[in-house]
């Protein structure tokens, strides 16, 4: 989103104050309470999972296509003002690493919802999965930004040979349920081996 703009640019304010919508429906989504909740929950889940891998994916794509990228750059560098592929990768990596904090701050100010950092610990792959709003987290620790008052669907899904043993740091009695994650601090889905 907004790769043409600096990472710190307040695109939320710009989109919401434009005479004609720059991004369809953003002002309307944020203005309507139920849609705002759904949007903020989805953004939270995406930044915790898929979007947290952006820099890694960009680097992988760059390495896999480096020869073609360099050849294309040599072909056009005298005719067009194009940055070197390494420079483009560095810019994209910087943007991906710094943009989420700014975007969440801007959304927090716009909606009046406080931000909180929560540590989520997803289980090892052989035990199971931790999902937020249906999106899986990679195994390991994740520092997740979340908004106050936004319920998120948390699910601990066990793999064969393991069973769900409860939550640590989360007041939820079942493997799946809706919770305001901003009230937690450190959350871990616990599993135990099933003895045949």
Image: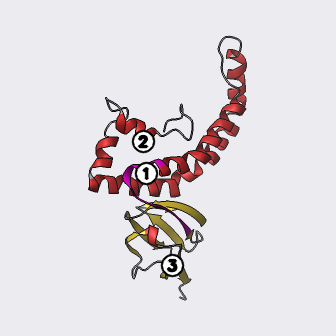
Tell which of 126 and 171 is nearer to you: 171
Residue 12 tag number: 2
Image position of 114 with respect to 12: above or below? below
The residue located at (62%, 38%) in the rendering is 92
Write down the region rendered in magenta: 106-120
Is residue 94 magenta-colored? no
Chain-order first, disc 3 or disc 1: 1
User: What residue does disc 3 label?
Assistant: 169
**Image position, residue 73 (x, y; %):** 69, 22
Residue at 27% of width from left, 56% of height from top? 34
SS assignment at label 1: helix
* Residue 86 x, y percent position in the rendering: 72, 33
Q: Nearer the viewer, mark 1 or mark 2?
A: 1
User: Label 1, label 2: how many angstroms apart (C-alpha)?
Assistant: 10 Å
Identify the element where label 3 is drawn. loop
Of the pair 32 and 67, the residue shown nearer to us? 32
Display colour scheme: secondary structure
Q: Which disc number belongs to residue 109?
A: 1
At mark 2, the secondary structure is: helix
Where is residue 117? Give x, y as percent.
54, 64
Which percent across, then down, holds residue 155? 43, 70
- Circle nearer the N terminus (1, 2): 2
Q: Is residue 112 magenta?
A: yes
137 over 168 or under it: above or below? above
**Quadrant hosting residue 76:** top right
- The answer to whether residue 177 of the structure is visible from this angle is yes
* Marks 1 & 2, CB-CB < 8 Å contact: yes
- Foreground tag (2 vs 3): 2
Between residue 121 and residue 156, name the one nearer to us: 121
Q: CA distance from mark 2 to mark 3?
A: 32 Å
Judge depth for marks 3 and 1 and give the one in front: 1
Q: Which of marks 3 and 2 precedes in the sequence?
A: 2
């Amino acid at each position: 989103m907004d790769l043409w703009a600096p990472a710190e640019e307040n695109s939320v304010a710009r989109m919401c104050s434009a005479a004609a919508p720059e991004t369809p429906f953003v002002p309307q989504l944020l203005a309507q309470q139920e849609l705002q909740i759904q949007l903020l929950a989805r953004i939270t889940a995406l930044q915790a999972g898929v979007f947290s891998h952006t820099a890694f994916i960009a680097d992988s794509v760059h390495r896999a296509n480096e020869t073609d990228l360099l050849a294309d750059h040599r072909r056009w560098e005298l005719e067009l003002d194009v940055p070197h592929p390494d420079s483009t990768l560095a810019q994209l990596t910087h943007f991906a690493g710094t943009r989420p904090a700014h975007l969440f701050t801007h959304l927090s100010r716009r909606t009046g919802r406080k931000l909180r950092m929560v540590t989520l610990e997803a289980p090892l792959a052989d035990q199971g999965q931790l999902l937020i709003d249906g999106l899986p987290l990679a195994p390991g620790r994740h520092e997740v930004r979340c908004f106050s008052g936004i319920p998120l669907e948390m699910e601990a899904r066990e793999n064969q040979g393991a069973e769900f043993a409860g939550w640590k740091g989360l007041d939820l009695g079942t493997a799946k349920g809706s919770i305001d994650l901003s009230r937690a601090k450190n959350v871990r889905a616990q599993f135990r081996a099933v003895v045949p």
